[in-house]
Image (cartoon, rainbow, N blue to C red):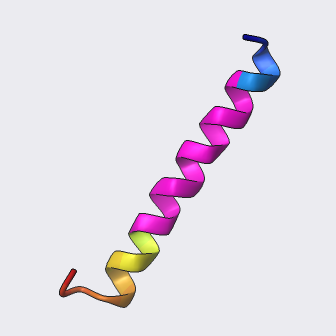
Amino acid sequence: MTAGDEMRIDQDVIDGISTLGNRTRLDPRS
């Protein structure tokens, strides 16, 4: 695995957390 691959995976994780956070704020019942 290259450093570029690691960075891309990290960005995917960050995007996933951001998506979950946005969904929680938009629908507090979930």
Q: Establish if 4 lies above or below 12.
A: above
Quick check: is 18 in the magenta stretch?
yes
In the shown orientation, is residue 8 left or right of residue 21?
right
What residue is at 50 percent from the left and 67 percent from the top?
19
Q: What residue span does the magenta drawing correspond to?
A: 6-20
Could you say which quadrant of the image residue 26 lies in?
bottom left
User: Looking at the magenta stretch, what is its main secondary structure?
Assistant: helix
Residue furthest toward the top?
1
At x 75%, y 24%, the residue is 5
**Figure check: 18 above or below 9:** below
Q: Measured from the top left, where is residue 8 in percent x and y?
A: 73, 35
Image spot of residue 27 (x, y percent): 31, 88
Residue sitting at the far front: 1
Q: Residue 11 occupies which quadrant of the picture?
A: top right
The x and y percentages for residue 30 are 22, 80
Residue 18's place in the image compared with 26, above or below, is above
Which quadrant is the N terminus positioned in?
Answer: top right
> Where is 28 relative to 18, above or below?
below
Direction from residue 4 to residue 27 in the image, left or right: left
Residue 13 falls inside the magenta stretch: yes
Q: Is residue 2 left or right of residue 16?
A: right
